[in-house]
Image (spheres, grey):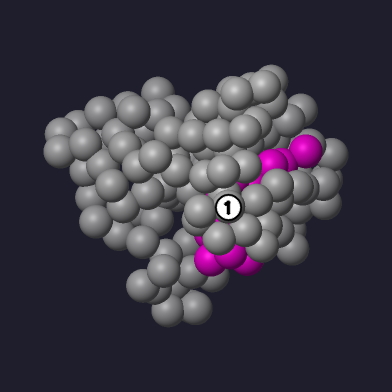
Amino acid sequence: MKIVLIACSSKKLGEKAKAGNIYSSNLFRLNLKYAKSLNADRIFVISAKHGLLELEKEIEPYNETLNRMKIEERKAWSEKVLEKLKNVSDLEKDEIIFLAGKKYREFLIPEIKNFKVPLEGLGIGKQLKFLKEKNEQ
């Protein structure tokens, strides 16, 4: 099974919406389009507040990011995400594709055997360029 994990974004709609729609940043929208082009079996948002989110799950807007969390908080968040991920995937066999920054994946990756990080090492500008090019193919 192929699973894509997309990081949430700070830019959100101002009202309750499905996780696949509430994040309104250009980077999130391009990541979602790219994820869909990969023919993934499942796509989830990894949210600083909610952990692992189905795209159809309705949530309220919030203002939380892993970028402002202490390392202990990020480790605890990662443990919760991993527990949910274990319920929907096989961390030994499934391919997990991260469309997420380092702080969102740093404590998840050591627990996943088969993973890819297509945007690793790219700044935001280069990520946007990569995604635009991939989405045009």
In the rendered image, which quarter contains the C terminus? top right
Q: Is residue 118 visible?
A: yes
Residue 123 part of the magenta-drawn span: no
Instruction: Tell me: residue 107, above or below residue 18.
Output: below
Residue 101 part of the magenta-drawn span: yes
Identify the image quadrant of residue 109: bottom right
Identify the image quadrant of residue 3: top right
Instruction: Tell me: residue 48, above or below residue 85.
Output: below
- Tell me the residue at 48%/48% (across/down): 7
Is residue 127 rendered to the left or right of residue 11? Answer: right
- Outermost left residue: 14
Where is mark 1, residue-wise?
A: 126
Magenta segment: 95-106
- Tell me the residue at 44%/72% (across/down): 73
Type of the residue with mark 1:
Lys
- Tell me the residue at 49%/78% (across/down): 71
Q: Nearer the viewer, residue 90 or 60?
A: 60
Q: Position of residue 72 (x, y in %)?
A: 48, 78
Q: Position of residue 38 (x, y in %)?
A: 69, 26
Instruction: Tell me: residue 77, above or below residue 83.
Output: below
Q: Nearer the viewer, residue 110 or 123?
A: 123
In the rendered image, which quarter contains the N terminus? top right
